[in-house]
Amino acid sequence: MAKTPLQFRHNGREVAIFVDGGTNLLVALRELIGDMTPKFGCGQGGCGTCSVLIDGELHLSCLTLAETVTGRSVETLDGIKDGPNLHPLQRAFADNFAAQCGYCTPGMLMAAKALLDRNPSPSRDEVVEAISGNICRCTGYEPIINAVLAAASGGRARA
Amino acid sequence: MPVTVKTFTSTNEAAAALSSDRSARYLGGGTLVMRALNEGDISISTVVRASDHALTRIDTGGSRITLGAGVTYARILADRDLGFLHAPARSIGGPAVRNMGTVGGNLFAPNPYGDFTVAMLALDAVVSVQGGLGSREVPIEEFLQSRDRQAGTLVLAISFAKPGNAEAFRYRKIARIKPKGGAVITLAAYLPVNGSRIVGARVALGSMAPTPIRARAAERALEGRSLDASTIDAAAAAAVEGTSPSDSAIASAWYRREIVSVHLKRLLSGQE
């Protein structure tokens, strides 16, 4: 079956790949572009660890048909740090012990970034709502919520 | 297994492609069809898409509200004119799912999903569909009753009369996980009042049958009455009539039957 050409911005860089029909964005990012930061969890939209930003909006990459991002901007966890410097959210996650096994962390960080980009000073309830599509089986969520609130009140998230 | 993806600019062509191929599915937000593909559903060999902007239009200008089938829950939550629909929209998924999932796709969402459709059923919505032979308007109840046979039709939009006042529409979703989770049951009611009497009561239930259904016995108990304690008790007592819930990992059929009257009572009496 013929492959489909696909061109989009990946963390600010123009990329062009060929995908099989029906390939989801997560597979395209991990296997064709080599960005291993979004994870495969459930493949059903239930866990959120594959979360990425498409044109600044939080989306589940495993439920996104890859070719629908043609011409759009896709941002993953790999793109949020500034060279060797961690993003304020990453620093806050480390400082607040918000990552244990780490599998949910990429999705949590992207969901948190989607929130802080829109709302730099969220309430606790708004943080809970923002990460409500992301499952963590280690931390019990409290350290994650505290980390997002710490990032919001301390180092402001970059636009 | 790779599938063929066909993207059309017009809904006519997309509808023709859907109706001529039994293994074709329409891809809206992806939360149902991509999930099926990820699970290796071999009954799907073609994915059809349409880029027509009419599919993402929201029209709240007239006496009827029309939501294009591709309108997402996030769009509804951003629209002040649709404030009465914010509760059902917010009860679905997390932010990512609300950025992706569409009101058209929700019509096809199996239990324990499909909460928005419960709200649409209470509001007596009409579904605009396009088949191979042209477009037509189908009452939502009729659409849901024949849902298994609708995979070959393209849903264009869903429309309903604007509620006279926002208070007349009520919605409640019972989930084990808060703030996000599949429904134990979902309830929606539309109770227009003329003078002090309810005229045209509609009560809809989700996860109480294979598709969302109307609680007709409860509606009869409400019709023509004022919404007082005895009317509410009578409607709540009748809520379970005509339902056929299933056992699932979220709740047993027995449990769903036990709680439906409790939650209808809370919905009608305005309790949290």
Image (cartoon, coloured by chain):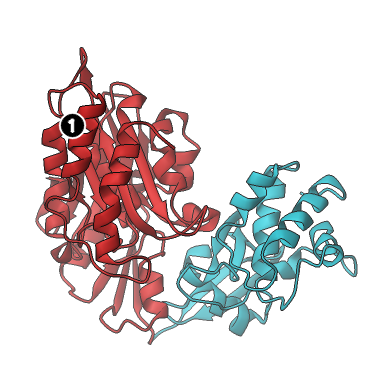
Chain letter of mark 1 equals B
Viewer can see residue A57? yes
Which residue type does callout 1 highlight?
Ala
In the depicted structure, whether residue B63 falls above or below residue A80: above
Q: Position of residue A66 (x, y in %)?
A: 50, 71
Give the residue pinned by disc 1: B201
Number of labels in the image equals: 1
Q: Residue at x 20, y 62 (%)?
A: B210
| Quadrant that contains the N terminus of chain B | bottom left
Q: Position of residue B180 (x, y in %)?
A: 49, 56
The quadrant where residue A30 appears: bottom right
Q: Position of residue B133 (x, y in %)?
A: 9, 56
The colour chain A appears in is: cyan
Query: Badge 1: few (under 14), some or many (20 or more) residues near its Cα, within 10 Å?
Result: many
Q: Residue at x 70, y 55 (%)?
A: A113
Viewer can see residue B69? no
| Quadrant that contains the C terminus of chain B | top left
In the depicted structure, whether residue A78 falls above or below residue B108: below
Q: Residue at x 42, y 28 (%)?
A: B81
In the depicted structure, whether residue B44 falls above or below residue A11: below
Q: In this view of the protein, which residue sits in the foreground, B162 or B112?
A: B112
Q: In this view of the protein, which residue sits in the foreground, B31 or B172?
A: B172
From the viewer's perspective, tell me whether residue A115 is left or right of residue B137: right
